[in-house]
Image (tube, rainbow, N blue to C red):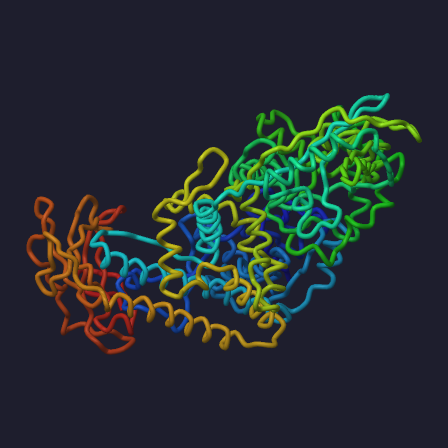
Amino acid sequence: MKTLIVAEKSSVAKDIAKALGGFTGQGDYLEREDILVTSARGHLAGLQVSEAAAGATLPIIPAEFGVAPIDDDCAKRIRMIAGLAKKKDVTRIVNACDAGREGELIFWYVFQCIDVAKPFFRMWMQSMTDGAIRQAFAQMAPAADKAGLLAAARSRAEADWLVGINGSRAFTQLLRMATGQRINVTVGRVQTPTLSLIVHRELQIRHFKPRDYYEVHATFHVRAGQYVGRWVRQQPSGDDDSKHRMSDLVSAQAIVATCRNAGGDIRVREESKPTSRSPGKLFDLTSLQREANTRFGFTAKQTLDLAQSLYEKHKATSYPRTDSSFLPDDYPGKVRDILGDLSNQDVYSPLATAVLSNDWVAANGKTFDSSKVSDHFAIIPTGQAPRDLAEAEQQIYDLVVRRFIAVFYPAARYLQTIRTTLVGSETFLSTGKVLKPPGWLAVYGRAADEDDADPELCPLDAGETVGLSDIEAKAKQTTSPKRFTEATLLTAMEHASADIEDDDDARQAMAEKGLGTPATRAATIEGLVEKGYASREGKQFVPTERGLQLVQQLERLQLGLLTSAKLTGEWEHKLGLVNKGRESRATFMAEIADFTRGIVTRLEEERSQLKPRPSAQSCPDCGFPMLLGQSKFKAGARYWECSNYPTCRTKCDDVNGKPGRKKEAPPVSTEHLCPDCGKSLIFRRGVGKKGPWKMWTCSGYPECTAKFDDAGGKPIL
């Protein structure tokens, strides 16, 4: 009797086989006498949306969702897994996909496409050491133990579909009627709030009015050189900058005059204290994307693609699509092995050797924490030396390796000096710091800290006389907020919980998740650009007029929840309850259905108040403007449809760019009846990208979505 283990990725399948030992084979699966190991290779199946749903009356809320392969390649992979699962000697099937919500969904979507009734079990692996894999295999539990996680995973996917499809279609219909143009817009739980961040930042910039203010800067001289001090209010209020600012030039000039007339009345007091700066955490995908954008100008997608190449092609770094910056508790030994491998790579040899020889791995407890490892641990090097890297790949690899080494180095230590210079009754502040032991900065060189360093202050002996070299009032202006770059937008998405003020549960849930996931944020950002909602100007994001209108219209229609991170926060909180069994999946989905109906109702209310816009091409049945469209079923064919759809379903042929003969509805058969509901079937035909097609659909649509293939003019029932 055999066990079939299905991992999420082929690399994980190989790791499982290596840890359990005794496997042979190099193709689609690995085998030993009692176990088969294969992989899904990521998402193979997704929610099935019937073609008929394209014309359904909103809201579209299926009684239940189907699942289907994403494409032909995915279908082929599923058939291969099905062949293994249905082997007579396979008596149990083990889900070894990633330990999280998405891994659960990937596995069960595959097996929803496979008709097999065998016991299912779950291997829960948060570490990929041989010992951890063997332990997960020995302690596998019935799959039913993760029923809550699966319910939450399904609910999240279906909720996104309901809100995205219905919101997008209803808003598209509204805009088409309002403008008389064939406009398509998309609304999404993650995409729209991300666009809202860009839009509201742009509006802040446009409405910003700069204010003049003044600062007084003085230059002092001592035997060892000069230093600069900024005038500081003795009883400051507000933020750190406000203590140096004055709102009028007269006050600033009065201070300048007072100090110039102070004669030799200059006194100095100085305080020095040791400070330290720890290295950053290991990279998760979002922090790696931020760093690569700041240092090299890479987009989030470019960084993800490069990190994926280092993982898949070169085997040089670990899995990149992670939201964790920690390693499992049992990884110190593995870390030492990797450092040993890096010590054989010339450029990193002295750095890695220093960690090993000083046993700094053992001294670092902050990096190892299994409770903070979700589906995957942090991005780290594998120790395998890559060859023939492209320049951009080498840059990402270097970031990952140096961060991995740096986290085990001691903190960088400074001597920070605060020098207060009193000129008469006025106070000037100077700060500086001197790097003592460089600690982890040695991994990067001193340049790594230049952006964060105060200038060193020239030394001052006790009792030394200080002179005033120069003093002036400087005119300045407040500056507007900066547009988002790739790095700052990723940060805003990751920390979107800060915008949720009135719901503690939603804010806490968002603090753990953020907008989107590390794996999807790059695609979300690229999607905004590709769909014409935002554009890049250099490194900065600017909303297009289309993007501005989308967000502003949703907020005007009191649908601001679609533009807010609060929606994701509320969902994540409730999905957490579903996972724990404290709220049923049915209750959550009922709430999502009600929310979806509310969106559609509000948009249809607005739509019902619109009057037909004057148009040269009007609907022959209701008078609303006709819109020119491209047929999805017949290559190159165009047609006209009424902008008042679905209230009016009139369609016309296109004749030289104008509406021609009205299209007749397909004939309803009296001979062939739907086996699901008993209503008549409708015969349809067309020409698609793959050639001519024929099919039968139910006349009871959208209540009945049954459809059947055609064989010789008859439906295959």
- Residue 56 lies left or right of residue 443; in this view the side is left
Q: Nearer the viewer, residue 710 or 579?
A: 579
Residue at the spot 79% in from the left edge and 27% down from the top edge: 349
Looking at the rendered image, the quarter that the C terminus falls into is bottom left
Where is residue 4? Give x, y as percent. 61, 58
Q: How many marks?
A: 0
- Residue found farthest to the right: 462
Q: Is residue 632 above or below residue 682?
A: above
Where is residue 315? Give x, y as percent. 64, 36
Q: Is residue 462 above or below residue 532?
A: above
Q: Nearer the viewer, residue 701 or 35?
A: 701
Residue at the spot 24% in from the left edge and 56% down from the top edge: 176
Q: Is residue 532 above or below residue 353?
A: below
Q: Is residue 51 above or below residue 130?
A: below
Where is residue 443? Give x, y as percent. 77, 31
Residue 407 visible here: no
Looking at the rendered image, the quarter that the N terminus falls into is bottom right
Q: Nearer the viewer, residue 434 or 712?
A: 434
- Residue found farthest to the left: 661
Where is residue 169? Give x, y as percent. 32, 60
